[in-house]
Amino acid sequence: MLNSVDPEKLRSVDAQSLDAVPVQVRSQASVATGIADFGLDIEQDLIYAATGKPKDLTLGKQITGKDAVKVTLQIALDDLPDLLVKLMTQYSAESYKENFAWVDHLAEVRDVLLLAQLNHQLTDKISSNDLDRSWLSVPEIIEWVDIEGFKYQKLKTGTMHSDIDWVSYIASLGDDTPCNVETFKKQQVLCIRQSSGQVAYAWPLYRCIYCELEFDGATYALTNGKWFRVDAGFLNVLNAAVNDIPTCTIPLPNYVDADEGAYNERVYMTDTAYFALMDKQTVSYGGGNSKIEFCDLYTSAKHLIHVKRYGGSSVLSHLFAQGLVAARLLLSDGQFHDKVNDKLPLGHKIEAADVKPMPSSYEVVYAIVSNNPAKFELPLFSKINLRNCYKQLQMFGMKVSLAVIHAPSVEEAPAA
């Protein structure tokens, strides 16, 4: 459809954000206009439908494209084959790249045959124990305070694991269960409450898979149960941008705690003159019930440290967004500024609300807890969100860094 529409005469665009909580939006213009007037972020939004005036008026006065194309025009039945040939020719063209080249950066795979081929590739990859660029992760934000661990499929007899990964999952299958996508979709990951031993969360294992693979000359990524085609050039630029983010210089200890709250408190207790504990110290802003944590740990050197256990795209994207929102409010909202000061200890007070903060004196630290720091890698959408947040924080004038905190597995832990 983008090959046929006039790029300056769009009337409606449907898009989905790649934020922690994906939001679908339909933007409609009162008059035909260009794509720039719809306020889309071409690095953060997936466009999946559009309506506008065709460049070729033999296609009618308006054309809409989504999974199928819709045109409205008067036509004789005998002329229908010629119209279909013209639409097929337009579908195969690449003229859209003159004005909409960025839509190739990322696109959800909807073709049934291609989906089957990608799932077949995934089966071959995992069953042959090729685990490069593929891992399992918790697909949503969970409350870790009362979580004992995870089991695969069987609540009563399954082995408890501190986290999920391919090695432990494959070992749980047994000889009679095939290691394939059908199994991945049928079997569940069970997240177990410590207090009751019951299931707190359950997900199909397929939804917990992140995988990148090459197929038929293109790069594809599976995340949260959906396949996406990724432009190779876009992926290279994205990886380079994420790799350029500085590493945090604060020596944060290993994560050997029951939950994030316990970890934050333990770090605070290592040096109460340097760290201020801000975890769960929510600050109201903007009226209503809007609340946000300024950070988990704040240092006397003005580091805003946000700590999160590793998880899927939604988990990490929430972490990155929280750091961005807190930083923006600190720099722009005097009331938020004062409320944060009320919660900070005497040795950590920030400037009074009538004193404009100096952005360059602050550093936002994203600290991610991982069982395998040596092979640590972010999911695709998390990279996109991190790059976006990093760029905005840099525009504010603030410093940003990443820290990967080691959470030793049960096998690594020293004997009691």
Image (tube, rainbow, N blue to C red):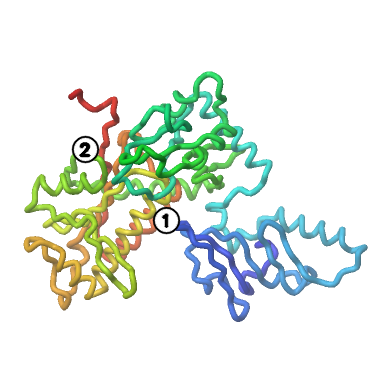
- Mark 1, secondary structure of its residue: loop
Residue type beneath disc 2:
Asn
x and y percentages locating residue 318 in the rendered image: 37, 55
Q: Is residue 252 left or right of residue 18?
A: left
Above or below residue 291? Residue 315 is above
Quadrant the N terminus occupies? bottom right
Q: Residue at x 42, y 30 (%)?
A: 156
Q: Secondary structure at mark 2?
A: loop
| Label number found at residue 214 | none
Residue located at (61% from left, 80% from top)? 31
Determine whether 271 is above or below 354 in the image. Answer: above
When the figure is inspected, residue 144 is found, relative to residue 170, above or below; the finding is: below
Image quarter of residue 251: top left
Residue 65 pos. (x, y %): 68, 62
Residue pointed to by mark 1: 20
The one of 291 and 297 positioned closer to us in this rendering: 291
- Amino acid at circle 1: Ala
Q: Is residue 43 visible?
A: no
x, y percent for residue 393: 30, 61
Does any portion of residue 96 appear in the rendered image?
Answer: yes
Counting from the top left corner in percent of width and height, residue 263 is at 21, 44
Q: Residue furthest bottom?
A: 30
Furthest-front residue in view? 196
| The C terminus: image quadrant | top left
- Which of the two residues, 153 or 65, is positioned nearer the viewer here? 153
